[in-house]
Amino acid sequence: MARPQMLKLREVLDEIGMSRAAFYRMRARGQAPRLRKLPNGQVRVSRTDLDAWWERCEQHAM
């Protein structure tokens, strides 16, 4: 099974058109895609988690 694509936070912010501060506010409310912290301290978002988040956003917009 292939590993999911892991995106840097900057890539995610660029894709969703959001500032880092706004993203972390959403995260504090439990409304942002899941962050995964790597052993070196960097954070990533899996493409699968981001796509699922987009899907939930679309469902809530209807």
Image (spheres, grey):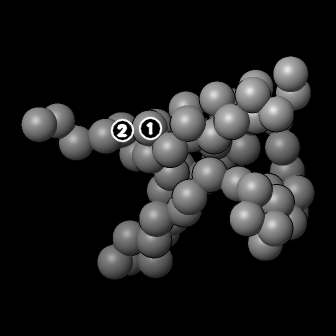
Q: Secondary structure at mark 1?
A: helix
Q: CA distance from mark 1 to mark 2?
A: 8 Å
Image quarter of residue 28: bottom right
Along the horizontal axis of the image, is 58 left or right of 47? right
Residue 23 in the image: state x and y as whole percent.
Answer: 79, 56
- Seen from the viewer's position, the closer of residues 18 and 60 is 60
Question: What's the residue at 81%, 67% (across, down)?
Answer: 29
Which quadrant of the view contains residue 5?
top left
Where, quadrant-wise, is the C terminus in this rendering? top right
Label 2 CA crowd tier, 10 Å (few <14, some 14–19, many 20+): few
Q: Measured from the top left, where is residue 22 in percent x and y?
A: 88, 57
| Image coords of residue 48 (percent x, y) | 44, 38
Mark 1, Cα crowd under 10 Å, few <14 / some 14-19 / many 20+, is: few
Q: Residue at x 45, y 71 (%)?
A: 37
Task: Name the residue tied to disc 2.
Answer: 5
Query: Of all residues shown, which one is farthest toward the left?
Result: 1
Q: Is residue 20 visible?
A: no
Is residue 10 rendered to the left or right of residue 51?
A: right
The amino acid marked with disc number 2 is: Gln
**SS label for mark 2:** loop
Q: Is residue 4 above or below residue 15?
A: below
Looking at the image, which is closer to me, 52 or 19? 52
Q: Earlier in the sequence, mark 1 or mark 2?
A: 2
- Relative height, residue 22 to residue 15 (above, below): below
Find disc 1 in the rendering and name its residue.
48
The amino acid beneath tag 1 is Thr
